[in-house]
Amino acid sequence: MRLNDSIFFATFDPLYINAPDSCSLCIAQPPAVNCEYCIEQSDGQRHYIKGFCCTACAAGLLQKLAGREAQGWAEEEAELQADDRDVLAMCPCARWRRIRLYLYL
């Protein structure tokens, strides 16, 4: 699994932006932010979800992203252990990504 998923949030001014009256995801709450969620598929293709979402759905998207990244790191760690490689001997940037992941959870 590739770990190139991303999410971007931006505030918007409802006086200047033609935003919908409700969240694009739950259709129950008013939107609070403009969001773009990118999921990289196993074949390398990227799937974008763009729209306006409420704070609850924004938090849900962040949790979804954290879960996908945790799953990807768990799979990569299992592959390294299956190859009998020392997981702690990974390059410093990879270790930083693992530390950052634990901070999310």
Image (tube, rainbow, N blue to C red):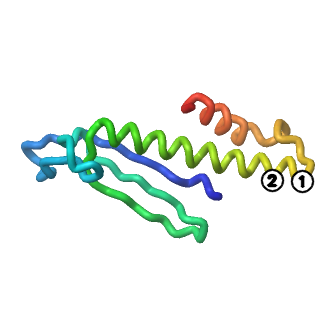
Query: What residue is shown with label 2?
Result: 79
**Residue sitting at x 53%, y 41%:** 66
**Residue sitting at x 40%, y 61%:** 48
Residue 57 located left or right of residue 86: left
Q: Quadrant of residue 15?
A: top left
**Residue sitting at x 65%, y 58%:** 1
Residue 55 located left or right of residue 97: left
Residue count near mark 2 (Cα–Cα under 10 Å), binned few <14, some 14–19, many ≥20: few
> Would you place residue 75 above or below residue 44 in this image?
above
Query: What residue is shown with label 1?
Result: 83
Residue count near mark 1 (Cα–Cα under 10 Å), binned few <14, some 14–19, many ≥20: few
Q: Amino acid at mark 1?
A: Asp
> Would you place residue 71 above or below residue 97 in this image?
below
Say whether marks 2 and 1 touch (CB < 8 Å).
yes
Front residue of 96/53: it is 53
Q: Amino acid at mark 2?
A: Glu
Q: Quadrant of residue 89?
A: top right
Residue 86 located left or right of residue 26: right
Count the numbered circles shown: 2
Measure how far apart labels 2 and 1 are at the Cα level: 6 Å
Residue farthest to the right, as pictured: 84
Pinpoint residue 19: horizontal percent, then vertical percent.
Answer: 15, 50
Residue farthest to the top, as pictured: 103
Q: Say what secondary structure mark 1 lies in.
A: loop
Pinpoint residue 67: horizontal percent, then vertical percent.
Answer: 55, 44
Q: Quadrant of residue 53?
A: top left
Q: Say what secondary structure mark 2 lies in.
A: helix
Pinpoint residue 63: horizontal percent, then vertical percent.
Answer: 47, 40
Name the quarter where the C terminus is drawn: top right
